[in-house]
Image: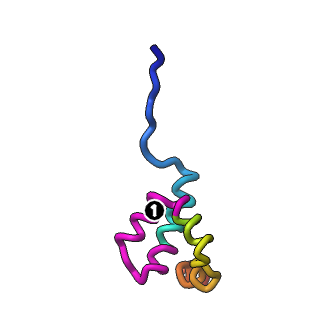
Amino acid sequence: MSETKIKYGYSFPQIIFSLPTAMIGYTINNGSIFWAIVDFFFWPLVWLKWFICQEVTLSIIKKSFEWFLK
């Protein structure tokens, strides 16, 4: 029998994408922490939905990271 190990958790590259996704989702959903958490865990699907529905704009990204861009 083969022994398979299931790895749970996030790696560093996944956090690099999921954390900004949650921050942008927080801005898009008018400060909803629930949707920010959902966006954090399902970031690939969220980006796919945002691109298909054209919900992400440069102004939303600037608004999400204005503390960093100042």
The chief SS type of the magenta part is helix
Amino acid type, mark 1:
Phe
Circle count: 1
Q: Position of residue 27 (x, y in %)?
A: 47, 80
Q: Indicate the position of residue 66 as horizontal and vertical percent values.
A: 56, 83
Quadrant in which the C terminus appears: bottom right
Residue 18: % across, % down: 51, 61
Residue sitting at x 64%, y 82%: 58
The outermost residue toward the right is 58
User: Which residue does the numbered mark 1 point to in the structure image?
Assistant: 40
**SS label for mark 1:** helix
Q: Is residue 40 left or right of residue 62?
A: left
Relative side of 70 to 30, left or right: right
Residue at (52, 65) in percent of width and height = 46
Question: Image point 42% across, 83% down: which residue?
Answer: 30
Q: Quadrant of the N terminus?
A: top left
The stretch of residues the image draws in magenta is 24-45
**Residue 60: x, y in percent?**
57, 82
Residue that appears at 54% across and 53% down: 14
Q: Nearer the viewer, residue 20 or 51?
A: 51
Q: Is residue 12 magenta?
A: no
Toward the left, the furthest residue is: 34
> 2 or 17: which is nearer to us?
2
Q: Quadrant of residue 34?
A: bottom left
Q: Residues within 10 Å of mark 1 (few under 14, many from 20)?
A: many
Q: Residue furthest top?
A: 1
Q: Is residue 29 left or right of residue 55?
A: left
